Amino acid sequence: MLAQHAHPTPASSVAHPACETTIEGQPCKRFSLAEIRVSVRCENFTVHLVHTGRKPWQEAGHNWVLARSADIDAVIADGLRAGPDRAWVDHADARVIAATQMLSGGEHASVTFPVARLRKGESYTYFCSYPSHALPMRGRLVLED
């Protein structure tokens, strides 16, 4: 909650929303964050993914994929059909809002997407599309004021 001031706060000291976050793809098929909050005041939002494991992507890769929660099962199924050459993501699928590339342990990647693609009140899920990771490696993305 913001403190009430008798005098206006100078523009230079006004807090701006964080329009980026860093999340770790960790061993044991999990993300370091269960929820990411995105401000409607951000024009774009950037997710920085760090794979903290050691295995190559072919054995235990991690990526970060965002879709509407209602679309998640279909996005995962279509991603599996896309196969390993496409990191189990159909990048032509309009239901995929954003996705990083698949990472090996020790690697990092970022993805930026327009916040205008998100709708207030809609439910969004992020996940790792590596086979067998998509169910346990999930989190919620929330659009807020």
Image: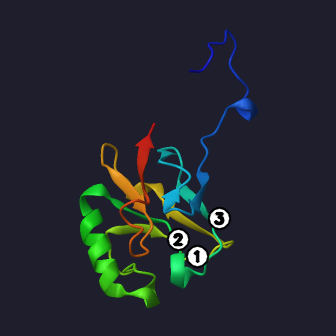
Q: What residue type is labelled 2?
A: His
Q: Which amino acid does label 3 sit on?
A: Thr
In the rendered view, would you say 73 is above or below 8? below
In this rendering, which labeled residue sits more in front, label 3 or label 1?
3
Q: How far apart are marks 3 and 1 (CA)?
A: 10 Å
Identify the residue under disc 2. 62
Q: Earlier in the sequence, mark 1 or mark 2?
A: 2
Q: Earlier in the sequence, mark 2 or mark 3?
A: 3
Identify the residue under disc 3. 52
Find out whether the residues at labels 1 and 2 contact each other: C-beta distance under 8 Å: yes
**The label number, if any, that marks residue 66 in the structure image:** none
Residue at the extreme front? 28
Coordinates of residue 64 in the picture (x, y in percent): 49, 66
Q: Mark 2, residues whose alpha carbon is within 10 Å: few (<14), some, or many (≥20)?
A: many
Number of marks present in the image shown: 3
Q: Which residue is drawn at 48% across and 60% down?
A: 114
Quick check: 10 left or right of 83?
Answer: right
**The label number, if any, that marks residue 103 in the structure image:** 1
Q: Quadrant of the N terminus?
A: top right
Pick the front one: 101 or 118 = 101
Q: How far apart are marks 2 and 3 (CA)?
A: 9 Å
Coordinates of residue 22 in the picture (x, y in percent): 62, 55
Q: Which of marks 3 and 1 is nearer the N terminus?
A: 3
Q: How far apart are marks 1 and 2 (CA)?
A: 5 Å
In the rendered view, would you say 141 is above or below 74? above
Coordinates of residue 15 in the picture (x, y in percent): 66, 34
Would residue 101 be seen by someone viewing this image from the given angle? no
Find out whether the residues at labels 2 and 3 contact each other: C-beta distance under 8 Å: no
Q: Which amino acid does label 1 sit on?
A: Leu
Q: Which element is circle 2 on?
A: loop
Q: Which element is circle 1 on?
A: loop
